[in-house]
Image (tube, rainbow, N blue to C red):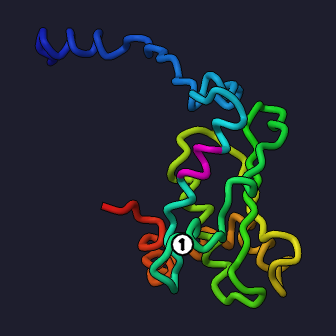
């Protein structure tokens, strides 16, 4: 036998769900202005501000200090059919045989993914002719499965975290 309060709570639990409007940053079709940017240049500057603080895995310098990342290496391409901004980030390793180029590309990708709070298609590339194995590295740093596998490795994840951590 149900009490009066149990019957009352059963009746109230069958309410229709309330629809909540999604914020613009969750809407794939939002324009740059709706996402909070004045224009493509504003988005480019914002991305550069995120990247300039990434620390080099070997040296006590930032990627900006070493001229590995630079504002002219950030390109805003035509958005996708869903109006998702397309970013192409080009970086220039310090030497043509840099053994940490893949790690630097991974740091760039993770930093942007964590810093940008709206959908974005991201392509990361080594500057043409700047590395002896650029094609292979470009393929690795743009492969979602390889990125996911790399971030599951605790040692690699800790190294990426230390490189992208914001300074206190």
Is 129 in front, or is 117?
Answer: 129
Q: Is residue 75 left or right of residue 94?
A: right
Total numbered circles = 1
The structure residue drawn at horizontal position 11% and vertical position 14%, both measured from the top left corner, is: 3
Structural crowding at the residue carrying mark 1, measured as other residues with C-alpha within 10 Å and reported as few (<14), some (14–19) or many (≥20): some
**Horizontal and vertical percent for residue 168?**
30, 61
The structure residue drawn at horizontal position 56% and vertical position 61%, both measured from the top left corner, is: 110
Magenta segment range?
45-49
Quadrant housing residue 13: top left
Q: Is residue 89 left or right of residue 36?
A: right
**Horizontal and vertical percent for residue 47?**
61, 49
Quadrant housing residue 155: bottom left
**Horizontal and vertical percent for residue 120?**
68, 44
Mark 1 highlights which residue?
A: 151
The structure residue drawn at horizontal position 61% and vertical position 30%, both measured from the top left corner, is: 37
Is 117 in front, or is 127?
Answer: 127
The structure residue drawn at horizontal position 62% and vertical position 61%, both measured from the top left corner, is: 109
In magenta stretch: residue 36: no
Is 29 in front, or is 91?
Answer: 91
Callout 1: SS = helix
Q: Quadrant of the N terminus?
A: top left
In the displayed structure, 80 sits above or below 126; it is above
What secondary structure is the magenta-colored segment mainly?
Answer: helix
**Horizontal and vertical percent for residue 105?**
66, 70
In magenta stretch: residue 47: yes
């Amino acid at each position: 036998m149900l009490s009066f309060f149990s019957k009352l709570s059963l009746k109230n639990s069958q309410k229709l769900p309330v629809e909540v409007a999604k914020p613009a940053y969750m809407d794939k079709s939002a324009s740059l202005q709706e996402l909070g940017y004045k224009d493509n240049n504003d988005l480019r500057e914002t991305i550069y501000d995120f990247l300039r603080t990434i620390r080099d895995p070997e040296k006590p310098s930032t990627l900006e200090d070493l001229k590995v990342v630079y504002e002219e290496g950030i390109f805003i391409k035509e958005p996708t059919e869903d109006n998702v901004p397309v970013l192409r980030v080009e970086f220039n390793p310090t030497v043509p045989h840099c053994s940490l180029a893949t790690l630097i590309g991974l740091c760039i990708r993770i930093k942007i993914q964590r810093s940008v709070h709206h959908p974005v298609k991201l392509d990361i590339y080594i500057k043409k002719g700047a590395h002896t194995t650029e094609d292979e590295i470009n393929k690795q740093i743009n492969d979602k499965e390889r990125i996911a596998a790399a971030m599951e490795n605790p040692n690699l994840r800790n190294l990426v975290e230390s490189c992208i951590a914001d300074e206190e």
